[in-house]
Amino acid sequence: MLFKSLSEAQSVAVSLVKEELNRIHKRYNLYDKEHLVMSLEHSTFEIMLSNFKELQDIFKHNVLEINNGYTFEHSVKVATMAVFVAIFMGLTKDEIDGICKGCLLHDYGKMFLDYEVIHKNTTLNENDILHLRKHCMMGFNYFINNPDIPIVSKQIILNHHENLDGTGYPRGLTIKSLNFSTQLCSLCDVYDALASDRPYRSAVPSSSAVTMMKKEIGVKFDKSMFLIIMRILCLD
């Protein structure tokens, strides 16, 4: 998807937030928990819209210069899920805003990467993967001196591909160095990436995505956190 204007991008973002919240709502209905979701949906929508407006100058460059519709849409969906969880868990407004901004910007570094690699429609080779892995540090370096981006957001941008056991990137951190906000973004990031169509593969069903993610417990995901977040999103 190519955006012709920031207003068009914002319109798409609003639609994506509503669609993601509707998916969550339907899952809650299946579990007879509809009464729990109504106020959470409203709060999530308001926070998403507020933070998107605060970041509109940044998104103007993101969506209009690189025209990477997938990355933009993916980031909005990841942020929507993460904000919903954060509100459900009773985090403070500042904490939720930090998570929201971090998730919206977690893949921003990809705008500095090779367009052909980002849009490659075949399986990525080793060099492609190494190139893509630069986006965490590039995004962090871009925002490091920006006073309008909270510290927790910058940590999410830098660390969302780190693993609990030190096998992630870019710095090989372990669970002791990974805060809740980063792990929340990482979990939502992986789920949406699996459950969405990519240039080089089709989406997998939601249940299959969760099954695949369970295999990463202890490596990428903390077991207790994984189970709690999956339950809040009605994906368990």
Image (spheres, rainbow, N blue to C red):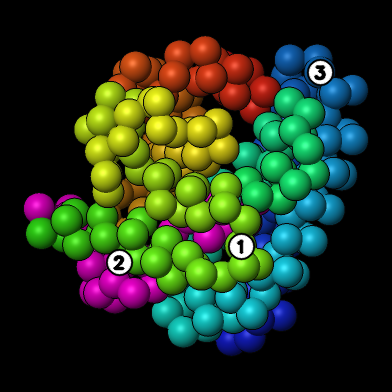
Q: Nearer the viewer, mark 1 or mark 3?
A: 1
- Mark found first going from the N terminus, 3 or 2: 3
Residue 208 visible: no
Q: Nearer the viewer, residue 83 or 99?
A: 99
Residue at image mark 1: 149
Rendered image quadrant of residue 150: bottom right
Determine crowd level at label 2: few under 14, some 14-19, many 20+ residues with C-alpha closer than 10 A.
Answer: some
Gap between marks 1 and 3, in whole Å? 35 Å
- Give how far across and how far down residue 87 sits, in percent: 77, 35
**Residue type at numbered disc 3:** Lys
Q: Which span of residues is magenta-colored?
A: 100-126
- Which residue type does callout 2 highlight? Ile
Q: Which of these two is toward me, 146 or 13?
A: 146
Q: Is residue 177 above or below residue 59?
A: above
Image location of residue 212, percent across then percent down:
35, 24
Q: Position of residue 227 (x, y in %)?
A: 54, 15
Left or right of 219, for residue 139: right
Element at label 2: helix
- Distance, label 3 to label 2, CA atoms, is 39 Å
Q: Which residue is mark 3?
A: 33
Q: Residues within 10 Å of mark 3 (few under 14, many from 20)?
A: some
Which residue corresponds to the image point at 48% horizontal and 48% vertical from the top-left? 155
User: How packed is label 1: few (under 14 Cα within 10 Å), some, or many (20 or more)?
Assistant: some
The three-letter amino acid code for the residue at tag 1 is Ile
Identified at 89% across, 35% down, the residue is 39
Mark 2 — residue?
A: 118
